[in-house]
Amino acid sequence: MKTKLFVLFTLLALVPSLQAKRIVLEGQSNTLFGDYRVESFDSPCTFSSKDCMCYLATYNNSDIVVKIVVWKEPLVTKYLVLSDKLSVQYVNNQNYLGVEKLENKFSGEGYSTIDQNMDRLAYFHQKVIRQGKLNEMESLLLIVSYFPQLIVKGSGDHSL
């Protein structure tokens, strides 16, 4: 009886920490990573002491899991693209959507851009992906399609 009560209380304690996810985007990355799926969390996540919208992207031909944190600032939205292989940020301002190395202010969260894992040619090709202001879903669609190109082949086991 005590064991059953302990299990019940443990499960009830864990329920608030579990966040429901729903699929917001699916499509083809046109890379070796294959098709992607992007899921959103029902509640904001806390990143660097700030509540942010978070997404989780997965690819069917890769074991890489990508967390995308939407960091909003006046006149610019930054999409922090975080994985165990490579972390970068995509910036969407009034003029363009493009990739940048992750800012130093996020190193306190344990993330930084590791140049050895990044394809520099792809990086410079993605400095401006599209001109103009994009909404969040348009930005996410481009980010999950372009991000796999940045990862140097052989920078880790990603089932390719």
Image (spheres, grey):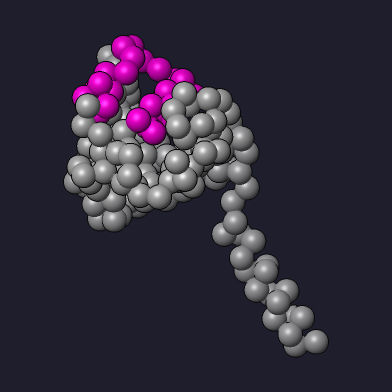
In the image, residue 70 lies in the stretch drawn in magenta:
no
Whether 98 is drawn above or below 49: the answer is above
* Residue occupying the point 33% across, 44% down: 154
Residue 71 visible, this orientation: no
Q: Main secondary structure of the magenta part?
A: helix
Give the left or right position of residue 145, taking residue 21 as reference: left
Picture quadrant of residue 4: bottom right
Residue 107 visible, this orientation: yes
* Residue positioned most to the right: 1
In the image, residue 147 lies in the stretch drawn in magenta:
yes
Question: At which x and y percent is residue 86?
Answer: 31, 44
Question: At which x and y percent is residue 66?
Answer: 44, 43
Camera-nearest residue between 24 and 46: 24
* Residue positioned most to the top: 132
Camera-nearest residue between 152 and 139: 152
Give the left or right position of residue 107, taking residue 58 as reference: left
* Residue occupying the point 62% across, 38% down: 22
Question: At which x and y percent is residue 126?
Answer: 28, 23
Q: Quadrant of the C terminus?
A: top left
* Residue occupying the point 25% across, 38% down: 118
Give the extent of the magenta segment.
Answer: 122-149
Question: At which x and y percent is residue 158?
Answer: 43, 46
Image mark count: 0
Whether 127 is drawn above or below 155: the answer is above
Camera-nearest residue between 115 and 155: 155
* Residue occupying the point 44% across, 28% down: 31
Q: Quadrant of the N terminus?
A: bottom right
Camera-nearest residue between 83 and 51: 83
